[in-house]
Amino acid sequence: MKFRKINTLKGEVTVPGDKSISHRAVMFGSLAEGLTEVTNFLQGADCLSTIDAFRKMGIEIENNPEKILIHGKGLHGLKAPSLVLDMGNSGTTTRLISGILAGQDFESTLTGDASIQKRPMRRIIEPLSMMGANIVSVNGNDCAPLHIAGSPLHGVHYHSKVASAQVKSAVLLAGLYADGETLVTEPALSRNHTEIMLRYFGAELDAEDKTARVRPEPRLFGRKIHVPGDISSAAYFIAAGLLVPGSEILIKNVGINPTRDGILKVAREMGGNITLLNENYNGEPTADLLVKHSTLHGVTIEGDIIPTLIDELPVINIMAACADGTTVIHDAAELKVKESNRIDVMVQYLSAMGCDITGTDDGMIIRGGQPLHGTTVDSHLDHRIAMSFAVASLVADGETEIKGSDVVTISYPDFYKDLARLCR
Ligand code: SPQ
């Protein structure tokens, strides 16, 4: 797909439902007794992979346009899948489902696309094995395919080396099937949607500082869930609104959970004009975001804020490239093990657009303020790379071509349509 510089962005946009919350609604609804109704569910390919996996384990899930209905069968209601479970491109599905499968009384095998088969699974194999799980990487390379023979599990206190919601959630979900309580402590707090939603379904779970604790064998009950808009999808409009001269856009109903809102803090620290309207703190907090074009300056981004904006760093790189001064990003080595190596790919194509950027072991250094020019970008089949460079193209001279642009179907199928509607 080809893009050109635009004059300005004006209007309102409603981004689709949060991907992390949509996945969890299907998973926990399947393990609950009775009906779970989910509205504003993200109809992205990753969340459809989660639905498909639970259907293959005997859960009836009705995917209607206005709501998803999950006919949960309780904690012990899953059936052995007769086929290999296909996780598609979804790291969240792969890692969280592994925690659930570890405690079943059947065997299963799960795999995914070429990207999933390269993403590290040792981070879940290790803690789940400590709990007594029988989980192996079929090719012996610590990646999917994974074979899991369900077995009795015991509670542990796991100290994770990485701040990862997927690792934390896998262990907590296995903890539902353990013989005692399970605790996870992480080096920095990662997104806490699992903790919030499992408690809402009836689990005995408490969380304090960087430790979450769950008690085993709860009865979970079907619930109604309205999924807030995904701040990771809103991030592209936040960046575009700040960067394109004269822009003013309202992004409606965005999740602003403090474990996800790092982009708002960083964008404001860079000088970004963002106003929160209609704030609602009932359950997962939400707000409308009014974004106005701003002159940005470089900042340092490091430490505990990193997990709260990890998926937004590619588009924050674009903001930094257009900001005056230097932006330094540390403590973000996790970027190397996402759908692509997001440090290498951002450095490669931002350099090609004329930006002065250097990759480091755990981040990047961006000396901003040089004019960007169009180039050809390969998305590396990474949705966040495609959307980030679509934003860069709006302020770059000449034409930008994004190869593999369709990959946005993973998290935001209508992204290009929504963006085009705002362009003036
Ligand atoms: O699901 P997947 O492929 O891992 O998706 C990504 C993304 O950019 O959409 C990461 F590549 O988001 C992860 C996120 O980075 C979703 C997630 C979750 O829902 O629990 C947690 C984060 O990953 P991690 O490894 O830090 O736990």
Image (cartoon, helix red, strand yellow):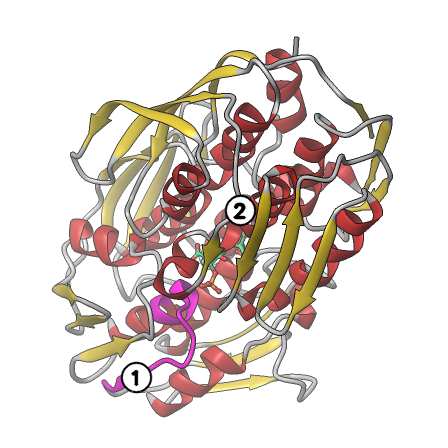
Query: Separation of disc 2 and disc 1 at Cα?
Result: 37 Å
Residue at the (53%, 46%) spot, across then down:
298
Above or below residue 310? Residue 399 is above
Q: In which quarter of the image is residue 214?
A: bottom left
Q: As shown in the figure, which amino acid type bears the numbered disc 2?
A: Gly
Q: Quadrant of residue 3?
A: top right
The residue identified by callout 2 is 298
Above or below residue 268? Residue 184 is below
The residue identified by callout 1 is 158
Q: Quadrant of the C terminus?
A: top right
Q: Quadrant of residue 251?
A: top left
Residue at the (24%, 71%) spot, across then down:
176
Q: Is mark 2 on a helix, strand or loop?
A: loop
Q: Is mark 2 within 8 Å of ligand 1?
A: no
Q: Closest to the observer: 383 or 358?
A: 358
- Going by the image, does 130 lie left or right of 214? right
Q: In which quarter of the image is the N terminus?
A: top right
Above or below residue 175? Residue 329 is above
Q: Can residue 338 be seen in this view?
A: no
Q: Is the Cβ of the residue at disc 2 closer than 8 Å to that at disc 1?
A: no
In magenta, the rendered stretch is 155-169
Q: Closest to the observer: 343 or 137?
A: 343
Q: Closest to the observer: 47 or 217?
A: 47
- Going by the image, does 13 lie left or right of 418? left
Query: Is 160 contained in the magenta span?
Result: yes
